[in-house]
Image: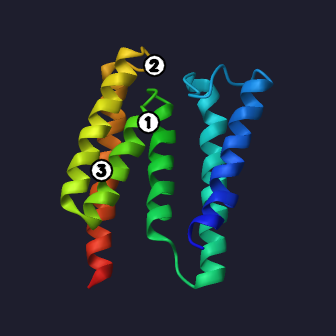
């Protein structure tokens, strides 16, 4: 039952938002590669995550640490978006690598390799410049480090 609320409160609404905005012409593509168009995407995703965190707190009595750090990552990416179009694909894959790393070091390293490949493909596809990919990676490494630190602290 952990996944169903995430699906209904975050994933489905974000997918519907993306499809609707692409179909109405507000977004040029599903990647939301345009930096100006990303502003509303960040706000919508953050709102969904906040609703999920509140729902989870009311239902289970605790703040979901992973979702809290996803929210922090989103805010950091949104702030950086004022200056540079940081790669969300790279950032989220690096954060997923940290989540795997917390469970199994080998899987974390494997996913980090996948995240690097994602970053390279974003450059090859000309969706991002190397600077944008590195900025997304830098933000994600910082947030991931903080997540891993807090995860360790809260386990003890």
Q: Which residue is mark 2?
A: 127
Image coords of residue 8 (percent x, y): 69, 59
Q: Is residue 119 above or below residue 114?
A: above
Distance (Cα) linking label 3 and label 2: 23 Å
| Residue at left offset 68%, top offset 35% | 18
Closer to the camera, 91 or 23? Answer: 23
Q: Which residue is mark 3?
A: 142
Closer to the camera, 81 or 141? Answer: 141
Q: Badge 3 local density, few (<14 within 10 Å), some, or many (20+)?
A: few
| 12 lies left or right of 132 | right
- Mark closest to the chain's N terminus, 3 or 2: 2
SS category of the residue bearing label 2:
loop
Q: Nearer the viewer, mark 3 or mark 1?
A: 1
Q: Which residue is mark 1?
A: 89
Q: Quadrant of the N terminus?
A: bottom right
Image coords of residue 45 (percent x, y): 62, 48
Q: Nearer the viewer, mark 3 or mark 2?
A: 2
- Mark closest to the chain's N terminus, 2 or 1: 1
Q: Would you say the residues marked 2 and 1 are in contact, meaning their CB atoms lie under 8 Å apart?
A: yes
């Amino acid at each position: 039952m952990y996944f169903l609320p995430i699906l209904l409160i975050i994933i489905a609404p974000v997918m519907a938002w993306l499809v609707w905005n692409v179909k109405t012409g507000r977004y040029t593509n599903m990647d939301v590669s345009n930096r100006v168009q990303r502003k509303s995407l960040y706000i919508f995703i953050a709102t969904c995550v906040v609703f999920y965190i509140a729902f989870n707190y009311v239902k289970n009595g605790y703040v979901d640490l992973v979702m809290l750090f996803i929210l922090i990552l989103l805010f950091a990416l949104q702030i950086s978006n004022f200056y540079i179009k940081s790669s969300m694909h790279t950032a989220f894959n690096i954060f997923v690598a940290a989540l795997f790393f917390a469970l199994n070091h080998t899987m974390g390293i494997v996913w980090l390799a996948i995240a690097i490949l994602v970053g390279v493909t974003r450059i090859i596809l000309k969706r991002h410049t190397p600077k944008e990919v590195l900025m997304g990676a830098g933000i994600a490494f910082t947030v991931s480090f903080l997540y891993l630190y807090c995860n360790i602290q809260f386990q003890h």
